[in-house]
Amino acid sequence: MNPLAHHARAKVLVVEDEPAIADVVARYLKRAGYETTVAATGQSALRQSEAARPDVVVLDLMLPDLDGLEVMRRMRRDDRRSAIILLTARAEESDRIVGLRLGADDYVVKPFSPAELVARVDAVLRRIDPLPEREAPLRFDRLLIDPAARTAEFDRRLLELTQREFDLLLFLARHPGQVFTRNQLMDHVWRYTFYTDTSTVTVHIRRLRAKLEPDPARPRHVETVWGVGYRFAP
Ligand code: CA
C-alpha cells in the first residue's frame, strides 16, 4: 500500500533560506501530495509553525537570523507534535547528535537528493497511525503507558517524551524481558532500512532513561544487555 495515500494531506513546513533548495524541496513534496509551505528565516518558521501546526518540519540548521537548533528548541518547547527532520551542510557527527538529543526525528546531510528527503518525510509520517486501535494501558509498578493517548506516566507524573522516545518505550514495554539489538530497534521503531547509524538508538535510549528513570545511571526499566542491546524489565 502506498503510505502517501494515508498522508496525502499532511502538512510540511520547509525552513530554508536558500531559495534554490527551498524551491526544489517544496516542488518534490507538493508532487508527493503534501501541503507544503516555506519559511526563509527562523522567526518566520516559528510563526508559521504556531499558525499552521505542520505534521513535519524540514529544518535547515544554518539560517540568517536564528540558529536552526535554537528554532528546534523553541518548537519543541511550544509543541511537541510536529516531527522534525534536520537539513545540515555540516557533516560533523556532533551537530547531528546535538540535534537528536534535542528531539529531532531524523536528519539529512547536504547535498541530498530531493527524492530521498521525500522518502524521509514519508517514513516519519508512516509511524503515525491515523486510526489507532484503542489499546489498554500497560502498567508496570510505578510506570503507566497509555498507547491510545500516547502518554507515559511515572509515579503519576507525565513524562515529556518526543514521539520517537515514546515509540521506543512502547515497543520495548510491549515485549518485556526480550532483548533487542540496536539494529532490531532501528527496524522496528525507526522502520526504514537505509538509515544505518545505530548511534541514534544509543542517543534515544539515553534520553529516554534521563526522563524515565529516577537514577539513569542504574536503570530499572530500560536495561542494557552488554554486547547485545537493550531490554525492558517490568
Ligand atoms: Ca541555510
Image (cartoon, rainbow, N blue to C red):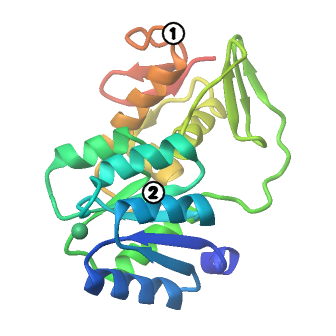
Viewer-closest of 89 and 208: 89
* Quarter of the image where one finds residue 6: bottom right
Location of residue 35 with respect to 48 vertically, above or below: below
Q: Residue at x 38, y 52 (%)?
A: 71
CB of residue at label 2: within 8 Å of ligand 1? no
* Quarter of the image where one finds residue 24: bottom left
Tell me residue 229's x, y (percent): 39, 31
Tell me residue 232's x, y (percent): 55, 24
What residue type is disc 1 on? Pro
Tell me residue 129's x, y (percent): 70, 59
Q: Which mark is residue 84?
A: 2
Q: Secondary structure at mark 1?
A: loop
Q: Residue at x 29, y 73 (%)?
A: 17
220 left or right of 64?
Answer: right
What residue type is disc 2 on? Ile
- Quadrant containing ligand 1: bottom left
220 left or right of 45?
Answer: right
Circle nearer the viewer, 2 or 1: 2
* Quarter of the image where one finds residue 159: top right
**Residues at marks 2 and 1, CA–CA distance in whole angstroms:** 28 Å
CB of residue at label 1: within 8 Å of ligand 1? no
Residue located beneath label 1 in the image: 214
Mark earlier in primary sequence (2, 1): 2
132 left or right of 33?
Answer: right
